[in-house]
Image (spheres, rainbow, N blue to C red):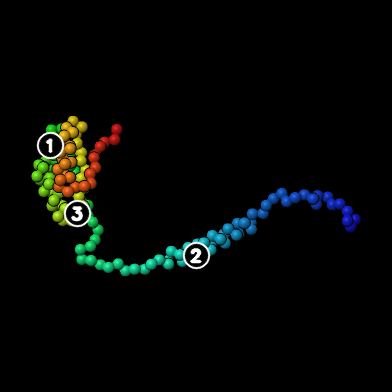
Amino acid sequence: MAGGASDGGDDGINEINVTPLVDIMLVLLIIFMVTATYIVHESIQIELPRAAHGGETTEQTFAVMVTKDDQSFLNGVLVTDAALVAEVQKAKASGADVQAVIGGDKAASHGAVTHVLDVLKGAGVTKFAIQIEKE
């Protein structure tokens, strides 16, 4: 029959072909990768000037310990307040950025640790850290 009803011709599309989608995504990925290299290379090219006294700043860390007898140790050596100030000033004179790590015995008095912090701050140290132990 020329115009008769057909068997199963009215069924819809039950599957989606993903091959064209994958092809398009791969082409877009390749285009993105190629154009990204041109974007990165189009930066401002400058040549920085040089200076005789330029360079990286150096940091010097002082490890100051306060014992339970309220004695101060700088890097393991017993020091007085004047010697502590002299060491900090010597490091600052050489151009180093000075920082201090303060470790106090838990039996040390709060006043002794505060005194060491005050001496260091008076010598010009502005960066401090308190050393602790994790439980």
Q: Is residue 82 left or right of residue 55?
A: left
Disc 2 crowd rating (10 Å Cα; few below 14, some 14-19, many 20+) is few
Mark earlier in primary sequence (3, 1): 1
At horizontal 17% and vertical 37% (from top left) the residue drawn is 113
Q: Dot 1: what SS?
A: loop
- Can residue 67 be seen here? The reply is no
Query: Which quarter of the picture shows residue 39?
Result: bottom left
Which quarter of the rendering shows the N terminus?
bottom right
Q: Is residue 126 left or right of residue 35?
A: left
The residue under label 2 is which amino acid type?
Answer: Thr
User: Is there CB contact under 8 Å for labels 2 and 3?
Assistant: no
> 94 or 21, which lies in front?
94
| Residue 28 tag number | none
Q: Dot 2: what SS?
A: helix
Mark earlier in primary sequence (1, 2): 2
Real-space Cα separation, disc 3 to disc 1, in angstroms? 26 Å
Query: Which quarter of the picture shows residue 25?
Result: bottom right
Q: Which residue is mark 3?
A: 96
Q: Which residue is mark 1?
A: 71
The residue under label 3 is which amino acid type?
Answer: Ala
Q: Residue 104, position in %: x, y?
A: 19, 36
Q: Which residue is mark 2?
A: 35
> 4 or 118, which lies in front?
118
